Image (cartoon, rainbow, N blue to C red):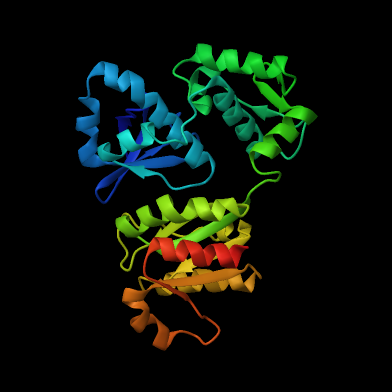
């Protein structure tokens, strides 16, 4: 059932819907056109934080959600995640690094230099640069204009040829290719992939995004998007939790000639391997570190 609730990170009143122990917040400034999930029992502890602490961290969390959801990554969090997000070495601190985030945003949303990207209203978009307020975003925009990296015409922004090359260099010289990871709806497994494996996959030119499945149909189960699968350049399907839905989805990808890498944790290998199709030879892994090494070998 849909309800209205205030997003704690951008302060907007938005539509929410319950999904298991979480509430999904839809189309606020943290995830325009998208959504994120917050564990329901974390709402009051976050809302009750001292004001100086909220002032120092909530805009960073909003920006973090914005960046991940803009990259089509599923975002679920709880009060326990806030400190690690704010203290993460990936969070930009300097004006130069914050400016790079705006270049990357424009790069993701344009097909080439000179193509317009609309950012409106600016007052709801300063989380694009992890800025605490609109004034800093405007300062960053003026900086990039003076460096002739962007052109601004009202709410329309364009990367110049130089800006496009700069953004491409930040991304490793080319746009990252979409890669879909199919895993079980398991919080520990999802955390392992998010923290240890997705950064490895990104190093090899892919933009990984997690899609989860449940063994039983529950309100929190996310249906796979065949359109999203079809857009992918690589599929990684983890068979640790048996799911006909996953195998069907990965089979759909194979039918489109999209490469599929199969993996399975050793604790479930005995259940999976005897019934596997002979063409499916999954990578058997014990630890995320071991799987990371094997994936590096495959992707290289």
**Residue in the image at 51% along x and 80% along y:** 281
Quadrant containing the C terminus in the rendered view: bottom right
Towards the viewer: 84 or 64 = 84
Residue 24 appears left or right of 126? left
**Residue in the image at 58% along x and 14% along y:** 138
Towards the viewer: 287 or 19 = 287
Return the x and y of residue 290 as percentages of the image width and height. Answer: 43, 65
**Residue in the image at 36% along x and 45% along y:** 76
Quadrant containing the N terminus in the rendered view: top left
Relative height, residue 99 to residue 222 (above, below): above
- Answer whether residue 245 is visible to the viewer in this image: yes
Return the x and y of residue 54 as percentages of the image width and height. Answer: 30, 22
Return the x and y of residue 220 as percentages of the image width and height. Answer: 32, 54
Towards the viewer: 236 or 17 = 236
**Residue in the image at 49% along x and 34% along y:** 32
Towards the viewer: 177 or 114 = 177
Total count of labels: 0
Return the x and y of residue 163 as percentages of the image width and height. Answer: 73, 29
Relative height, residue 4 to residue 300 (above, below): above
């Amino acid at each position: 059932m849909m309800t209205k609730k205030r997003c704690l990170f951008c302060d907007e009143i938005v539509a929410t819907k319950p999904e298991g122990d979480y509430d999904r917040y839809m189309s606020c400034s943290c995830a325009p056109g998208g959504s994120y999930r917050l564990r329901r029992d974390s709402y009051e502890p976050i809302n009750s934080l001292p004001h100086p602490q909220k002032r120092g961290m909530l805009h960073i969390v909003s920006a973090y959600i914005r960046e991940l959801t803009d990259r089509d990554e599923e975002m679920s969090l709880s009060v326990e995640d806030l400190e690690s997000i704010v203290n993460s070495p990936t969070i930009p601190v300097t004006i130069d690094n914050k400016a790079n985030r705006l270049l990357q945003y424009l790069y993701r949303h344009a097909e080439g230099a000179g193509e317009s990207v609309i950012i409106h209203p600016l007052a709801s978009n300063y989380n694009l640069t992890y800025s605490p307020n609109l004034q800093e975003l405007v300062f960053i925009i003026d900086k990039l204009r003076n460096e002739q990296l962007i052109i601004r015409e009202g709410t329309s922004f364009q990367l110049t040829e130089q800006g496009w090359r700069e953004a491409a260099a930040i991304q490793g010289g080319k746009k990252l290719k979409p890669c879909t990871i199919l895993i079980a709806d398991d919080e520990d497994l999802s955390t392992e992939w998010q923290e240890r494996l997705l950064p490895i996959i990104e190093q090899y030119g892919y933009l990984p995004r997690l899609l989860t499945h449940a063994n039983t149909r529950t309100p929190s189960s996310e249906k796979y998007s065949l359109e999203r699968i079809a857009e992918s350049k690589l599929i990684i399907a983890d068979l640790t939790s048996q799911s006909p839905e996953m195998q069907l989805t990965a089979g759909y990808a194979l039918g489109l000639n999209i490469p599929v890498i199969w993996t399975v944790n050793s604790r479930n290998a005995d259940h999976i391997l005897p019934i596997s199709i002979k063409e499916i030879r999954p990578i058997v892994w014990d630890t995320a570190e071991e799987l990371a090494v094997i994936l590096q070998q495959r992707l290289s």
